[in-house]
Amino acid sequence: MPRLVGMNHIALEVDDIDEALAFWESIFGPLELRGRGKQMAFIDMGDQFLALARGRTQPPDQERHFGLVVDDKEAVRQRLQELGIPVFGRGLDFRDPWGKQFEVVDYADVQFERAPGVKRKLGMEGLEKSAAARREIAERGLDTPGG
């Protein structure tokens, strides 16, 4: 049987590509794009990407959400406050202008590890995992010898 081994990208529908890129840049600063056309834009995240596709057709999501991993969750919280974007939920959740819900998670607290080249590209070389994340990584057998 084939196995799921990760995600390459997530595609999100938006009403307007320029507005969507401006929204993401307002939170995360200048974006590196893998590509851009009239109907789509691809925001680079190392070895993954976020695809923005023009043509939102469904109403705002109520419970469905996307989890975004960031290098500094509290900096995102502060930036959202500065922009007047409401934060809700038990952690750090917000909605984009088209009603999609995002949950922000700190890299230190998740079990996945970025490869050294990706960490270098994203400027993450010095980031450490929390004790809870290291324990979860070890319990799942995902740690590497000497890592």
Image (spheres, rainbow, N blue to C red):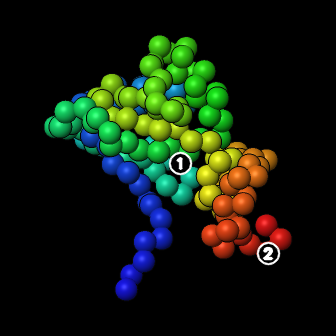
Say which residue label 2 marks.
145
Q: Is residue 31 visible?
A: no
> Which class describes the residues within 10 Å of circle 1: few (<14), some (14-19), or many (20+)?
some
Q: Where does residue 89 sit, x and y in percent of width and height?
A: 46, 30
Residue 69 appears in view = yes
Residue drawn at x 27%, y 40% as measured from the top left = 13
Residue type, mark 1 in image: Met
- Residue 144 against residue 12 in the figure, above or below: below
Q: Is residue 40 above or below residue 132?
A: above
Q: Secondary structure at mark 1?
A: strand
Q: Residue at x 51, y 33 (%)?
A: 90
Report whether 16 appears left or right of 72. left
Say if 126 sits above or below 95 in the image.
below
The mark found on residue 98 in the picture is none
Residue 73, located in which quarter of the rendered image? top right
Q: Quadrant of residue 70?
A: top right
Q: Residue at x 16, y 37 (%)?
A: 57
- Tell me the quarter of the image containing the N terminus: bottom left
Q: Earlier in the sequence, mark 2 or mark 1?
A: 1
Q: Residues at badges 2 and 1 in contact (C-beta under 8 Å)?
A: no
The secondary structure type at the circle numbered 2 is loop
Q: Position of residue 102 (x, y in %)?
A: 43, 37
Which residue is pictured at 44% across the width and 60% down the height?
Answer: 8
Three-letter amino acid code at disc 2?
Pro
121 and 37: which is toward the camera: 121
Residue 45 is marked as 1
Assign the C terminus to one quadrant of the image: bottom right
The one of 89 and 24 positioned closer to us in this rendering: 89
Q: CA distance from mark 2 to mark 1?
A: 27 Å
In front: label 2 or label 1? 2
